[in-house]
Protein backbone atom coordinates (compact mmCIF):
# COMPACT_ATOMS: atom_id res chain seq x y z
CA UNK A 1 0.00 0.00 0.00
CA UNK A 2 1.08 3.55 -0.71
CA UNK A 3 0.13 5.05 2.65
CA UNK A 4 1.32 4.52 6.23
CA UNK A 5 -0.87 3.11 9.00
CA UNK A 6 -0.09 4.45 12.49
CA UNK A 7 -2.13 3.61 15.59
CA UNK A 8 -2.48 5.40 18.92
CA UNK A 9 -3.02 3.19 21.97
CA UNK A 10 -3.41 3.67 25.71
CA UNK A 11 -5.61 3.23 28.74
CA UNK A 12 -8.59 5.36 29.66
CA UNK A 13 -7.66 9.00 30.14
CA UNK A 14 -4.22 8.71 28.57
CA UNK A 15 -4.91 11.67 26.28
CA UNK A 16 -4.12 9.79 23.06
CA UNK A 17 -7.11 11.22 21.18
CA UNK A 18 -6.08 14.80 21.96
CA UNK A 19 -2.51 14.06 20.91
CA UNK A 20 -3.63 12.33 17.71
CA UNK A 21 -5.55 15.39 16.51
CA UNK A 22 -2.72 17.73 17.48
CA UNK A 23 -0.27 15.62 15.45
CA UNK A 24 -2.71 15.56 12.53
CA UNK A 25 -2.79 19.37 12.52
CA UNK A 26 1.01 19.58 12.52
CA UNK A 27 1.34 17.09 9.66
CA UNK A 28 -1.30 18.84 7.58
CA UNK A 29 0.48 22.17 7.99
CA UNK A 30 3.51 20.45 6.45
CA UNK A 31 1.41 19.54 3.43
CA UNK A 32 0.97 15.85 4.21
CA UNK A 33 -2.28 14.04 3.45
CA UNK A 34 -3.54 12.80 6.80
CA UNK A 35 -6.68 10.93 7.82
CA UNK A 36 -7.70 10.67 11.49
CA UNK A 37 -10.05 7.87 12.44
CA UNK A 38 -11.00 5.77 15.46
CA UNK A 39 -12.04 2.37 16.72
CA UNK A 40 -14.55 1.15 17.35
CA UNK A 41 -16.06 3.36 14.68
CA UNK A 42 -14.58 5.26 11.78
CA UNK A 43 -17.32 4.34 9.31
CA UNK A 44 -21.12 4.44 9.36
CA UNK A 45 -21.68 0.78 10.19
CA UNK A 46 -18.76 0.59 12.62
CA UNK A 47 -20.03 3.67 14.47
CA UNK A 48 -23.38 1.94 14.96
CA UNK A 49 -21.58 -1.09 16.41
CA UNK A 50 -19.61 1.29 18.66
CA UNK A 51 -22.82 2.58 20.19
CA UNK A 52 -23.83 -0.98 21.08
CA UNK A 53 -20.45 -1.95 22.55
CA UNK A 54 -19.85 1.13 24.65
CA UNK A 55 -23.40 1.81 25.84
CA UNK A 56 -23.11 2.06 29.68
CA UNK A 57 -26.48 0.32 30.00
CA UNK A 58 -25.25 -2.86 28.33
CA UNK A 59 -23.76 -4.30 31.51
CA UNK A 60 -24.88 -7.86 30.70
CA UNK A 61 -22.83 -8.08 27.50
CA UNK A 62 -20.85 -11.33 27.37
CA UNK A 63 -17.07 -11.02 27.02
CA UNK A 64 -16.98 -13.05 23.80
CA UNK A 65 -19.84 -11.01 22.36
CA UNK A 66 -17.86 -7.87 23.15
CA UNK A 67 -14.72 -9.22 21.47
CA UNK A 68 -16.64 -10.32 18.37
CA UNK A 69 -18.34 -6.95 18.05
CA UNK A 70 -15.00 -5.16 18.23
CA UNK A 71 -13.61 -7.43 15.52
CA UNK A 72 -16.69 -6.89 13.33
CA UNK A 73 -16.46 -3.12 13.70
CA UNK A 74 -12.75 -3.31 12.91
CA UNK A 75 -13.35 -5.23 9.69
CA UNK A 76 -15.97 -2.79 8.44
CA UNK A 77 -13.79 0.17 9.39
CA UNK A 78 -10.88 -1.26 7.40
CA UNK A 79 -13.00 -1.95 4.33
CA UNK A 80 -14.75 1.42 4.28
CA UNK A 81 -12.09 3.77 5.60
CA UNK A 82 -8.55 2.56 6.33
CA UNK A 83 -7.71 0.44 3.29
CA UNK A 84 -9.05 2.91 0.68
CA UNK A 85 -7.12 5.76 2.32
CA UNK A 86 -3.91 3.73 2.47
CA UNK A 87 -4.29 2.79 -1.18
CA UNK A 88 -4.59 6.50 -1.97
CA UNK A 89 -1.33 7.22 -0.17
CA UNK A 90 -2.66 8.82 3.00
CA UNK A 91 -1.02 8.77 6.38
CA UNK A 92 -3.76 7.15 8.47
CA UNK A 93 -3.76 7.91 12.21
CA UNK A 94 -6.08 5.54 14.06
CA UNK A 95 -7.26 5.91 17.65
CA UNK A 96 -7.04 2.24 18.82
CA UNK A 97 -6.68 -0.95 16.79
CA UNK A 98 -5.88 -4.63 17.40
CA UNK A 99 -3.72 -3.99 20.46
CA UNK A 100 -6.74 -2.62 22.30
CA UNK A 101 -8.58 -5.90 21.79
CA UNK A 102 -5.57 -7.91 22.94
CA UNK A 103 -5.30 -6.05 26.23
CA UNK A 104 -8.95 -5.26 27.00
CA UNK A 105 -10.56 -8.51 25.86
CA UNK A 106 -7.57 -10.85 25.79
CA UNK A 107 -6.32 -9.91 29.26
CA UNK A 108 -8.94 -7.68 30.90
CA UNK A 109 -11.78 -10.07 30.00
CA UNK A 110 -9.55 -13.15 30.38
CA UNK A 111 -10.31 -14.48 26.89
CA UNK A 112 -6.65 -15.12 26.11
CA UNK A 113 -4.37 -12.96 23.98
CA UNK A 114 -3.70 -15.68 21.40
CA UNK A 115 -7.40 -16.40 20.76
CA UNK A 116 -8.26 -12.71 20.46
CA UNK A 117 -5.29 -12.17 18.15
CA UNK A 118 -6.42 -14.99 15.83
CA UNK A 119 -9.93 -13.57 15.70
CA UNK A 120 -8.66 -10.11 14.81
CA UNK A 121 -6.09 -11.24 12.27
CA UNK A 122 -8.96 -12.97 10.50
CA UNK A 123 -10.95 -9.72 10.63
CA UNK A 124 -8.07 -7.65 9.26
CA UNK A 125 -6.68 -10.26 6.85
CA UNK A 126 -3.38 -9.92 8.69
CA UNK A 127 -3.01 -6.15 8.47
CA UNK A 128 -0.97 -4.62 11.31
CA UNK A 129 0.14 -1.02 11.88
CA UNK A 130 3.52 0.13 10.64
CA UNK A 131 3.93 2.01 13.93
CA UNK A 132 2.01 2.03 17.21
CA UNK A 133 2.34 4.83 19.74
CA UNK A 134 1.45 3.65 23.24
CA UNK A 135 0.58 6.37 25.77
CA UNK A 136 1.37 5.01 29.22
CA UNK A 137 -0.42 6.45 32.24
CA UNK A 138 -1.21 5.24 35.75
CA UNK A 139 -4.91 4.23 35.61
CA UNK A 140 -5.70 6.19 38.75
CA UNK A 141 -4.43 9.34 37.03
CA UNK A 142 -6.23 8.55 33.77
CA UNK A 143 -9.59 7.91 35.42
CA UNK A 144 -9.25 11.08 37.52
CA UNK A 145 -8.78 13.03 34.28
CA UNK A 146 -11.96 11.51 32.89
CA UNK A 147 -13.95 12.62 35.92
CA UNK A 148 -12.77 16.20 35.40
CA UNK A 149 -13.50 16.21 31.65
CA UNK A 150 -17.22 16.79 31.20
CA UNK A 151 -16.90 16.81 27.39
CA UNK A 152 -15.44 13.31 27.13
CA UNK A 153 -17.73 10.41 26.23
CA UNK A 154 -18.52 8.24 29.27
CA UNK A 155 -18.61 4.61 28.17
CA UNK A 156 -19.08 1.14 29.60
CA UNK A 157 -15.34 0.58 30.11
CA UNK A 158 -15.11 3.61 32.37
CA UNK A 159 -17.34 1.75 34.84
CA UNK A 160 -14.82 -1.07 35.34
CA UNK A 161 -13.00 -1.39 38.67
CA UNK A 162 -9.49 0.04 39.02
CA UNK A 163 -7.94 -3.44 39.06
CA UNK A 164 -9.26 -4.03 35.54
CA UNK A 165 -7.48 -0.92 34.26
CA UNK A 166 -4.22 -1.93 35.96
CA UNK A 167 -4.44 -5.31 34.21
CA UNK A 168 -4.89 -3.49 30.91
CA UNK A 169 -1.86 -1.30 31.59
CA UNK A 170 0.34 -4.29 32.42
CA UNK A 171 -0.83 -6.00 29.24
CA UNK A 172 0.04 -2.93 27.15
CA UNK A 173 3.49 -2.80 28.72
CA UNK A 174 4.01 -6.49 27.99
CA UNK A 175 3.07 -5.97 24.32
CA UNK A 176 5.45 -3.02 24.07
CA UNK A 177 8.27 -5.12 25.51
CA UNK A 178 7.46 -7.94 23.09
CA UNK A 179 7.33 -5.73 19.99
CA UNK A 180 9.71 -2.80 20.61
CA UNK A 181 10.24 -2.11 16.90
CA UNK A 182 6.54 -1.49 16.26
CA UNK A 183 5.28 -0.24 19.62
CA UNK A 184 6.87 2.92 21.03
CA UNK A 185 6.02 3.98 24.58
CA UNK A 186 5.37 7.61 25.50
CA UNK A 187 4.87 8.77 29.09
CA UNK A 188 1.41 10.32 29.23
CA UNK A 189 1.59 11.56 32.81
CA UNK A 190 3.21 14.88 31.82
CA UNK A 191 1.27 17.95 30.69
CA UNK A 192 -0.40 17.59 27.30
CA UNK A 193 1.99 19.98 25.53
CA UNK A 194 4.99 17.87 26.62
CA UNK A 195 3.27 14.67 25.51
CA UNK A 196 2.52 16.17 22.09
CA UNK A 197 6.14 17.29 21.75
CA UNK A 198 7.47 13.84 22.69
CA UNK A 199 5.07 12.22 20.24
CA UNK A 200 6.07 14.56 17.45
CA UNK A 201 9.78 13.91 18.01
CA UNK A 202 9.24 10.15 17.92
CA UNK A 203 7.02 10.33 14.85
CA UNK A 204 9.45 12.59 13.02
CA UNK A 205 12.25 10.10 13.62
CA UNK A 206 10.09 7.34 12.19
CA UNK A 207 8.94 9.27 9.12
CA UNK A 208 12.47 10.39 8.25
CA UNK A 209 14.01 6.99 8.85
CA UNK A 210 13.88 6.17 5.14
CA UNK A 211 13.18 8.22 1.99
CA UNK A 212 9.91 6.50 1.13
CA UNK A 213 8.42 7.26 4.55
CA UNK A 214 9.02 10.98 4.28
CA UNK A 215 7.38 11.39 0.84
Image (tube, rainbow, N blue to C red):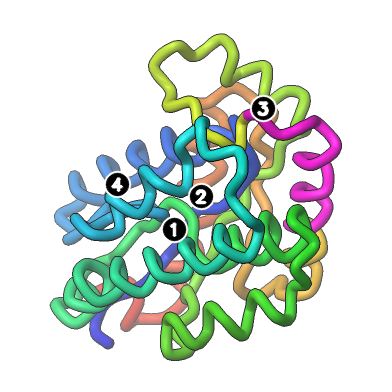
The answer to whether 94 is drawn above or below residue 75 in the figure is above
Q: Main secondary structure of the magenta part?
A: helix
The answer to whether 92 is drawn above or below residue 181 in the figure is above
Q: Name the residue under label 4.
A: 24
Q: Where is residue 128 in the image (x, y as percent from the top left)?
A: 49, 79
Question: Residue sitting at 24 percent across and 76 percent down?
Answer: 79
Crowdedness of circle 4 by 10 Å Cα count: few (<14), some, many (20+)? some
> Which mark sits nearer the N-terminus, 2 or 3?
3
Crowdedness of circle 1 by 10 Å Cα count: few (<14), some, many (20+)? few
Q: Is mark 4 on a helix, strand or loop?
A: helix
Using the image as rendered, state which of residue 18 and residue 66 is in the foreground.
Answer: 66
State yes or no: discs 1 and 3 in contact (Cβ < 8 Å).
no
Q: Can you tell which mark lies on residue 204? A: 1
Q: Which of marks 2 and 3 is in front?
A: 3
Q: Distance between the residues labelled 4 and 2?
A: 14 Å
Q: Nearer the viewer, mark 1 or mark 3?
A: 3
Q: What element carries label 3?
A: helix
Q: How far apart are marks 2 and 3 (CA)?
A: 23 Å
Image quadrant assignment for residue 64 = bottom right
- Asked whether, in this view, residue 104 is left or right of residue 121, the answer is right
State yes or no: discs 1 and 2 in contact (Cβ < 8 Å).
yes
Q: How far apart are marks 1 and 2 (CA)?
A: 5 Å
Crowdedness of circle 3 by 10 Å Cα count: few (<14), some, many (20+)? many
Q: Does the magenta stretch include residue 162?
A: yes
Question: Residue sitting at 22 percent across and 67 percent down?
Answer: 81
> Which mark sits nearer the N-terminus, 4 or 2?
4
Screen quadrant of the C terminus? bottom left
Q: Position of residue 195 (x, y in %)?
A: 56, 35
Using the image as rendered, state which of residue 207 and residue 128 is in the foreground.
Answer: 128
Q: Can you tell which mark lies on residue 142? A: 3
Amino acid sequence: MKGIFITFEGGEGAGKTTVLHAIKDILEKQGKRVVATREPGGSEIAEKIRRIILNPDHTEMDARTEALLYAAARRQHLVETVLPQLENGALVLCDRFIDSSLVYQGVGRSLGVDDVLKMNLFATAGLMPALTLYFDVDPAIGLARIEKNSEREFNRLDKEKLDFHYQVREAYQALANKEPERIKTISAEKDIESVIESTWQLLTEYLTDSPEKSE
